[in-house]
Image: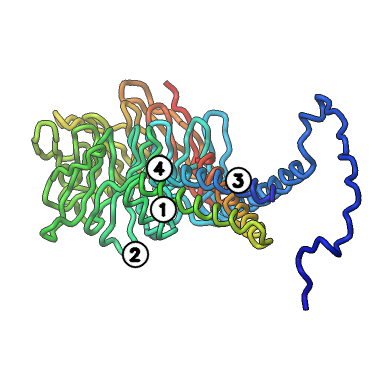
Amino acid sequence: MPGPLTGAGNTPAAPPAAPPPVAPPLSSGAEAKPHPSEARALLLTALVLLAGVALGAAGFFVERGMSTWRPEVTRTANGWRVVQAHRPPLGGLALGGDDLVWGCGPSIVLMDLTSGRLKLLGPGPASRTTWDPAASQRYVVWFEAAGTSAGEASAWVYDSATRRRRQLATLGDVLSLPSASGSRAAWCTTTRGGGPGIVAVDIPSGEKISVAPEYGVPVIDGDLVTWPTRTGPTGMPAAWALVDLAQDRRWAMVPAATLGNAHFLGYDLSGRTLVWGETDPASGRGRVVAQNVDDGAGSVVAEVTGGASLTSAPSIDGDLVVWAEALAAANGSRVMGRRLGGGPSFIVRDVDGRVLSTAAGGDTVAWLAQHGQTTFIETAKAPR
Amino acid sequence: MRVLLWLLVELWVLNAADLLLTRYSLSLGFATESNGVMDYFFKSGTVQAVAFKLGIVTVGTLLLWRVRRYRTALFAAALLTGVFAAVVAYQALWVLSF
């Protein structure tokens, strides 16, 4: 039987209370010092925090090291050298403002030409396929699609002023690569009726303008959109279609100064000047031609003969035209330039490899080249 | 007890940092919210996302504090804080590298 909880009778008397301990007077140093248990608590929580931070940082750097889009970037005497060896080759070179953009497998990569910093622009998590990008001073435009086919793609834009990326438009079938200039982009896609159509898009608002209900590979510069029409078996167009978006006017222009059996290499537009490259395999001649879109006056910018050959379409920005020539000696190429304002053509750089494409933007020249399994992009400043 | 208190404070601050970094990354257009619940709230609006994320973690930390006499509460708080620290560090490095 349990006893009572309290009982006055048989409870032994409590010993006399001991005097309370007297704490020593606190010094000013003792006041600032945290309690040992407090310090231990802080230390333990800091350790947990550090362990987490270390884990997160390790994950970030491991993921970064495993990425296949990140090339080796080095600064050269007057530009940059971007090398990609034994990985998805570099392609789709574009220059815009202070940015150099290219494709690498499905990745769209941007490099800031001032700092050399790289930025992966695409594809987004829902996409697996991309097409070569286009760049203007401020915007980079490219296409992405969930599958590997060209149907049901979407156009994306990166704004270098705000550092933001967003979807610009949805497309039907991708019938051309995008072209970008200022705050506009243009491309060819299937329209609602199912037929091809060339459209221009105002990038800030996303508003679409129907340029022409036909197939074409357009290039836009300012208000002007152009594309080759009635191309023959060699790819050489019989005419250029031109549309001035500001004046809502369309006209055609016959190419000037063409070679006898011209094979078309590609074209570019800047201001009111159209440039293209053509070769005649029979005679071994190559030619870069510039033509004014208003009066049709054409001029030969460069004639490539004597064993050398024109290897890429020319690129123009302002009065600077650049192109690439393969030298008669094996494995050698050179990037050439000429200012339409006057003066002879000049060598921008001798390249150890085959130049696949060139781009001009301001005074900057960029080229994509291949040497064996290695693809590389180099930039340089064109002399004034 | 002190350790748990500090861990819960850290957890709450890291949660707020995670929210800010996620919102910023989403606004850049490069990131997507992989947590379906948070994705729903971010799509509903920033205020809803902030209210839900801060609210749920506040409730969670209060519950952990309430059961503080159990050792499991301490382990749970340490684990959550470590995971949040890892997530925030990853996101911060991603934003800085951008």
Three-letter residue code for mark 4: Leu
Q: Residues within 10 Å of mark 1 (few under 14, many from 20)?
A: some
Three-letter residue code for mark 1: Thr
The numbered mark at residue B32 is 1
Circle 4 residue: B28
Q: Give the left or right position of residue A41, taking residue A322 as reference.
A: right
Q: Give the left or right position of residue A300, taking residue A370 as reference.
A: left
Location of residue A35 in the rendering, given as x and y in whole percent from the top left corner: 77, 39
Location of residue A183 in the rendering, given as x and y in whole percent from the top left corner: 26, 34
Three-letter residue code for mark 2: Gly
Three-letter residue code for mark 3: Glu
Circle 2 residue: A147
Same chain for the residues under marks 3 and 1 in the image? yes
Same chain for the residues under marks 1 and 2 in the image? no
For the residue labelled by badge 2, is the local secondary structure a helix, a strand or a loop? loop
Which chain is indicated by disc 1?
A: B
- In this view, the residue in front, B63 or A118, is B63
**Earlier-in-chain disc, 3 versus 4:** 3
Q: Which of marks 1 and 2 is in front?
A: 1
Q: Nearer the viewer, mark 3 or mark 4?
A: 3
Residues under labels 2 and 3: Cα distance?
43 Å
Residues under labels 1 and 4: Cα distance?
10 Å
Residues under labels 1 and 2: Cα distance?
19 Å
Q: Nearer the viewer, mark 2 or mark 4?
A: 4
Q: Residue visible at 90% across and 47% down?
A: A16
Residues under labels 2 and 4: Cα distance?
24 Å
Q: Give the left or right position of residue A324, taking residue B74 as reference.
A: left
Q: Residue visible at 50% across and 39% down?
A: A378
Q: Residues within 10 Å of mark 2 (few under 14, many from 20)?
A: some
- In this view, the residue in front, B18 or A323, is B18
For the residue labelled by badge 4, is the local secondary structure a helix, a strand or a loop? helix
